[in-house]
Image (cartoon, rainbow, N blue to C red):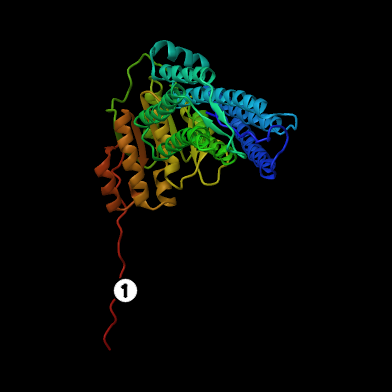
Amino acid sequence: MRITGTVPYLGGQTDWPATVAELPLVQILAAATALFLSILILAAVGRQATRKSFQKFAFLSSVVLLIGAIVSNILITIYLQLPAINVNAAASALLVSKQVQATFDLLFAVTIGAFVLATAKPEIESRKAFVDYMRNEFPSPFLFYVFVQVLAIAAVWAFQATVLIPPFPTVTKLEFSIPFLFTLGLEWVTVMVYVPFMLLSSVRRIPARRVKTDVYLIILGVCGFAVSEFIVEIILPSYAIDGRAAGFVLEMALVGLIAYAVRERGFLEDLLVPQAEAQLSTAPTYDIKRGLTYLVLEETSDHAYEIFRDFVTHGAQGLCITRKAPKNVQEQYGLEKTPILWLSRVATQKNSIRPSPPENVALAIEHFFGVGKESVVLLDGLEYLVAHNDFPSVLALIHDLNENVSLSDAILLLPLDSRAINEKEFALLKREIEIIIPPGASKLTPRVEVEVSKPPKRAH
C-alpha cells in the first residue's frame, strides 16, 4: 500500500531548497518509466490468446489499478511543486493522495488474488465460472482474503498518518497509529500466506517442471511486490526515507515477471482444450488399465491410433502429439474435436511443437493431464525424439511422464518400432512401461549393435 509521500519543506511559504526542487523530477521520471512498463505489459497480455478469460481480465484489471496509483502519485508530486502551496496545505494534500494510492493498491491486491485463484483452479475460465465457484465453495480462502483487503481499505481512511515535517527539511516523516499498523500488517501477512498456499496446492496436481517454475515466478512476483510495498511505503517513511523512485520501477518489473510466467500456459490453454470426440453408448473395444504408460510395438502407428480413438469416442479426453500433419490425422482417424500437436522442427503453425528440448513435449502433456478428465495421450514420434535428443534425455522424459500418468490416473500410448533402438535402450524402456503387441503383428526385435573390428595383420 502507498501511504508515504514527500512534502517539500517550504519554509512557511515558497522558500524551496535546491535539493528539494530536484527531487520531484526523479520521482516523475521513475513513475513515467513504471507507467511505460505497465503499458507494455497491458499490450502483451491483451494480445495473449487464452480461453481463461477471467484470469486475463483479473490480471489486466490489476495492471490498470497500478496505473491509477502511479498517476495519482505523479499528480500530487506536481501539485506540491506549486509556489502557492504552504506547509499545512501540502501536508493535507499529501495524506489524501496517499489514501487514494493505498486504495488503488489494495484493490490491486483484490484483483491479483482473483488472478491467483483462476490460476490455481483450472475450472474457473469465465466470470460465470467464478461466480459458480464462489457460490459452491462458500466460505472459501478467497472470501477471507477479500475481507482482509476491504478491512485494510477502511483502516486507510479511518486512521490517518501524522505528517512530521520539522526537522526534516527535504523529506517528510510519517508516523502511523497502532491500529493502522496492525490492520495493514494483517493484510500483508494474508497476501504472503494466501498466494503461495493457493498456487503450491495447484502444483501438486500438475507436477510439470516448467509449470512449477512458472508458478514459482508468480509467487515471487506477487510476494515480492507485497514486500516492496511494505518496505517502501511503511518502513522507510517512518525513518524519513523516500524510496518511491526505485519502488515504482521495481514493483512494475515484478508485475512484468507475473506476466512472463503466464505467457506459455495461456498459449497451451488456448490450444489444448480437453473434450471427448463422442459419448458412444456401446462398450469400448479395448479395456486397458488406467494410470499406466503403454509401449505399442508396431511398424506403423495404426494400432495405437485405434486404441486412442476407441477411448476418445467413449468419453475420454484425448491429446495427440504426432509426426504426421494434423490435418491428415483428423481425416484418417476421424478426430475432429481432439487437440492435435505437430511434432516438427520446421513447421511454423500455432499447433506445432519442437522435439528439442524434450521439456517442450513434457510441458504440453503434463498441462493436459492437469486440466483434462479421464485423459489419454498418444505420443506418436518416440523415434523422432530420440533422433533429435540423446536417448538418456528421452528416457528421463518417459520417467517423468510415467509418474505423472500414475498421479493423474491417465493413459499414455507410445507406438514404437523397436528396431529403431538397440537392445540396451529397449531393455531400459521395458523396465518402466507396459508392452502391447498388436494381434497378428510379427515380433519385432531391437536393433543389435555389432562392433566391427579390424582383421589382424598377417605375419610376414
* Position of residue 390 measured from the top left corner of the image (x, y, whole percent): 39, 53
What residue lies at 26% left-to-right and 42% top-to-bottom? 432
Q: Quadrant of residue 457?
A: bottom left
Q: Is residue 232 visible?
A: yes
On screen, residue 118 versus residue 442, left or right, reads right
Q: Toward the viewer: 232 or 392?
A: 232
Q: Quadrant of residue 416?
A: top left
Q: What type is the residue that disc 1 sits on? A: Lys
Q: Read off the residue under disc 1.
A: 454
Q: On screen, 425 above or below 202? A: below
Asked which secondary structure carries label 1, the reply is: loop
On screen, residue 242 versus residue 116, left or right, reads right
Q: Look at the image and tell me in which quarter the C terminus lies.
A: bottom left
Number of labels in the image equals 1
Q: On screen, 244 above or below 92? A: below
* Extreme-right residue of the structure: 83
Would you call the spot at circle 1 few (<14 residues within 10 Å), some (14-19), or many (20 or more)?
A: few
* Extreme-bottom residue of the structure: 460
Q: Is residue 417 visible?
A: no
Q: Toward the viewer: 6 or 295?
A: 6
Q: Quadrant of residue 8?
A: top right
* Position of residue 437 measured from the top left corner of the image (x, y, whole percent): 29, 37
* Extreme-top residue of the structure: 135
